Image (spheres, rainbow, N blue to C red):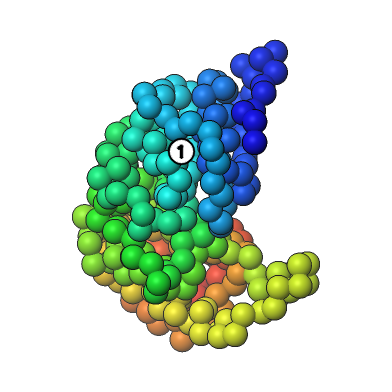
Amino acid sequence: MPPIAVNHAWASSLSSVVLLEVPFGYCLQLLQLLPNLIEFRARGRRFHSSDLPALDKELVLPKMEIFEWSFARDESSISLLRYVHLPSLRTLGLGLIGYDEVEPATSGLFLKRLPPTVTELELVWFSADPDQAGVDWEIIFPPLVSVRKLSLIQCSLASTEEILGCLAYKKRWLPALAEICIIDRDPAEMEKYDDTPIPKGDDDYKIEVRKAVLRFAETRRDGLGSGFDVKTIGRRLGWSLRDKKRVDVLISRGLRLGILEDEQLVECLYSNI
């Protein structure tokens, strides 16, 4: 496939690009051709190769504030992790494609180069696959000391539990964290609009995520400051009066814990408060 041709008359004015399932070589080429981007997202569930050249020198994107990329087993992707500099970054999105084939030193150096302006971290489509090496959270989380919001976007139950469990155990990771947002399409809506069947065990998913959220809040309450919000968007987790007792205990211990679904407090957890 030939390189991308860009009309330079509009290239300098373009500020946002979102790409889905585009080979990383083309994503990388666009980054080099569009120097004034403020937002760039390259998202995909599958790996796509290309024969375009990888980076071999530093690439500075001075205006980039929102950047999403995947750990992928493509030389273009790996070279970007080695050479890109994002001095104005505020929101970092990370996907997972072939994570086990990216050297930890490469991803680690990329994360350590990030500026202290990064206050939002998005983990996209992370899925704990028993056939792949696990994610080394010790490389991902410790450098991101300024992150206040963590979003888990369409991550699997196993990954959601693993992430919350790691953060509960490693209290020094993401020390500024004040909000977790779990974003997932509701299974009923998925079935309605694109014939995706409701996954078996969806009730179990909701139960386990509720447990993981409260476990995290309980273990981290002393380090969460005066307030902490857990939001779910899309899929409702079925909070009940059984969960209210644990929420009451946390609030009685001084934690302003907000549990919200689609930006509204879960009413059954906050009655009589």
In the displayed structure, 188 sits above or below 100; it is below
Q: Residue 2 at what x, y percent from top left?
A: 64, 31
Q: Residue 43 at what x, y percent from top left?
A: 56, 48
Q: Residue 80 at what x, y percent from top left?
A: 41, 35
In the displayed structure, 210 sits above or below 17; it is below
Residue 241 at least partly seen: no
Residue 201 at least partly seen: yes
Residue 199: image quadrant is bottom right
User: To which residue does mark 1 refer?
Assistant: 76
Residue 39: image quadrant is top right
Residue 257: image quadrant is bottom left
Name the element at disc 1.
helix
Is 140 on the left or on the right of 78, as rendered? left
Q: Which quadrant does the N terminus fall into?
A: top right
Q: Nearer the viewer, residue 52 or 169?
A: 52
Residue type, label 1? Ser
The residue positioned 61% from the left and 44% from the top of the image is 22
Q: Nearer the viewer, residue 12 or 117?
A: 12
The residue positioned 45% from the left and 76% from the top of the image is 210
Is 248 on the left or on the right of 157, as rendered? left
The residue positioned 38% from the left and 27% from the top of the image is 56
The residue positioned 46% from the left and 38% from the top of the image is 76
In the displayed structure, 183 sits above or below 102; it is below
Q: Residue 244 at what x, y percent from top left?
A: 45, 80
